[in-house]
Image (cartoon, helix red, strand yellow):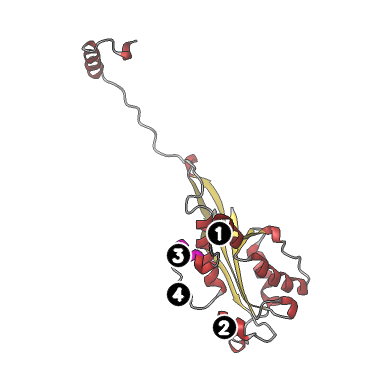
Amino acid sequence: MREIVLDTETTGLDPDAGHRLVEIAAIELVNHLPTGRKFQRYLKPECEMSPEAQAVHGLTLAFLADKPVFAEIVSELLEFMGDSRLVIHNAEFDLKFLNAELKVLGFPQVPGSRAIDTVQLARRKFPGAPASLDALCQRFNIDNTHRTLHGALLDAELLSEVYLELVGGRQSHLSLEREEIVPILATGSTVRVDATSRNGRVSRVDVVSEVELAAHTALLARLKNPIWTA
């Protein structure tokens, strides 16, 4: 099961007011676990940066001046995302910005039904408790001390750990079958391999010797009405 953890940073709170993306990051999960494949880009927004947004992520227009615009990275982003389900903290916010950028370029919109909103997931699991990313990191003892500012890649990495805990930890279901995810190096994709189908050591069959049988019979003879002879 492939999923993509997605996070963004922006110039403000509302794309309808002209605010734009300044960073987007995505992390690949297979069976809820990171595979190591990541996508991250800083973006030149071609608009002003609100002071409030800059205080959140620390990205300045001067830093972003030589970065690509969204149109230059959109194809690579969509290829990385594929048709996988998206895992997003406060999905409505990020999808609104992503879809605003896609709409300008004539790309199809990403439906909300494709996203798992970890804010809603946390609120259902812990009613009344704080559901911010920092609060969930604290709840699950995930180290976020290096998070002094928001950053799309850092937040996506933390969210991937939080999401794993929200769905039940490293063993989210009971299964006696072993399954491995094996990378296909030529394509960068993966394939599942049922480890139980591999040729393993043949089970040993222990044969009871005549001496052991005689000792067992002698033991039963000393018992009153042994059930093993019924």
Front residue of 28/98: it is: 98
Mark 2 to mark 3 CA distance (whole Å): 24 Å
Magenta span main SS: helix
Q: Is 140 covered by the magenta stretch?
A: yes
Q: Is 225 covered by the magenta stretch?
A: no
Quadrant for residue 221, please give it: top left
Residue named by callout 1:
29
Quadrant for residue 116, please give it: bottom right
Quadrant for residue 118, please give it: bottom right
Q: Residue 14: horizontal and vertical position, in percent?
A: 70, 76
Q: Residue 71: horizontal and vertical position, in percent?
A: 71, 76
Residue named by callout 2:
55
Residue named by callout 4:
146
Ranked by sequence position, the earlier of labels 2 and 3 is 2
The residue that appears at 71% across and 64% down in the rendered structure is 110
Residue range highlighted in magenta = 136-141
Mark 2 to mark 4 CA distance (whole Å): 16 Å
Mark 4 to mark 1 CA distance (whole Å): 23 Å
Ranked by sequence position, the earlier of labels 1 and 3 is 1
> Mark 2 Cα within 10 Å, few/some/many (few <14, many 20+)?
few
Secondary structure of residue under mark 4: loop
Of circles 1 and 2, the one toward us is 2
